[in-house]
Amino acid sequence: MALATQAPGPVTPLGDDRGSSHRTIALGSSPFGSTLPGVIAAIAFGAACLVWLTAGNQLPGGRWIVVHIFTLGVLTTLIWTFSKHFAARFTATTSLASRPATATAATILLVGSIVTMLAGRALHAHLPLALGSVGIMIVVGSNLLVLRRHRRNATATRFVWIVRQYEHAHIAFIAAAGLGGALGAGWLPGSMFVAARNAHIHLNVLGWAGLTVLATLAAFGPALLRVRIAPNADTRAATGMHAATLGLWVTTAGYLVTGLSGDAGPLRLLTVGGLVAYGYGLVTVAGPLLRASRTTARSPMRWALAASLIWFLVAIAVDIIMVASGSPGWSQELAAMLLVGVLAQLVLAVLSYVGPMLRGRDLATRDRLIARVERLARLRSATFNLGVVLLVGAHVLPRLTGAPVERAGWIVVAAATIAQLGPLLWPTGTPDPDRVYSVTAARYRPPPREPE
């Protein structure tokens, strides 16, 4: 199934002048056109992450603010943007989608709210922090209503369960925001602080981001790999994702209950059981995609997609072990795996896929952009994951590695990120319409005809 992809138009053999200029004819609106404002905002926030990482503690908020810039500026903006886009596609209700002017205004409100909240956090100013938080909650809450409208009016039902998962992810975000507000306001007793903070982080990372990502990959992952969905894979993923959602709420309840009871050992099994159920959902989605990424060479995104899923599996296993052993708090190595190895890497893969469709307004230009994505894809992915290994290792073995290795990890990750996005943002020039630049386009172009 081709999800939101636009197949090249009819092609003619190389050297045939009767129709070769079709590759320079302007295409219609991009299948991802509605996501453009959100994508631009996310790239801008990503650039801000790199600036703050480089500056260290020279800018307001220091390096710790980078986590908030990424989770709010990059992840929240993209989740909000693409959940609307895919909900309309999966339910065949694009007619119910917001008008471009309305969508742009909502994006401006969301971005403005995020910037205001980040400024409040960095400057320790309560008023902008509160105003920004309210603005974000309004935008996310209204999007929950939009998703429900798409689901209830669906004319295509195969992937309606994905939209329902988006709704659960939005609810998790609202619950996480409530917990975060209670922690910030000091409404919870000190004995519950660590447990409530863990619940808050899990609702954000595994709920808001994780549920959205996994549900989307069940249907969109094959498109990233340029393969068909494996038989019954989406049905198994639907069952697994329902278990993952239930596991998320059980995990949240487990953290809060153990916080109230003083971390009674047997009650930890509740949290562990929830994480195991979440892991089962992850396996049902990751299994077919990992098999496909191993057996197909059709997509340059296969390296990044496979690596991110492996990091996700490792992170859930580590999380389960930590909870079962009674280790307190959310570890930094776990944060590096999930935020950088999984989520940041998937963001780059998705932008690499949609970027040529957003920028290439004719087939020749799109072909050239895809060729840039294909070039050195394995090396860029290997470099990025080397950076993740360094970040994780710096926290697993702090006495042997420590700060220098962590700095090296951030440098490598930043370099790989720039190498991934730079070719997409660089001017395309005027490509030769009769030349095939990418392996992807070559599949649709027959060989030159022999002279008669």
Image: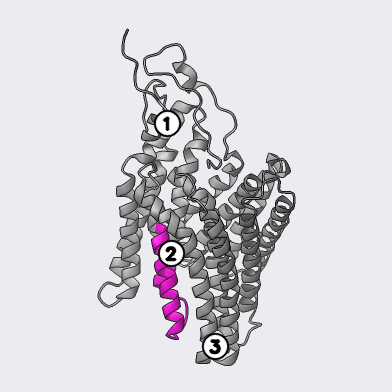
SS under mark 1:
helix
x and y, in percent, of residue 7 in the image: 51, 32
**Circle number at residue 267:** 3
Please say whether residue 429 is visible from this viewpoint: yes
**Circle number at residue 300:** none
Residue occupying the point 65% across, 77% down: 182
> Which numbered disc, 1 or 3, marks the residue that appears first in the sequence?
3
Q: Amino acid at mark 1?
A: Asp
What residue would you read off at disc 1? 367
Q: Quadrant of residue 342?
A: bottom left
Q: Quadrant of residue 112?
A: bottom right
Please say whether residue 57 is visible from this viewpoint: no
Q: Quick check: 83 left or right of 307?
A: right
What residue would you read off at disc 2? 312
x and y, in percent, of residue 21 in the image: 46, 17
Residue occupying the point 37% across, 54% down: 414
Does 14 sit above or below residue 268? above
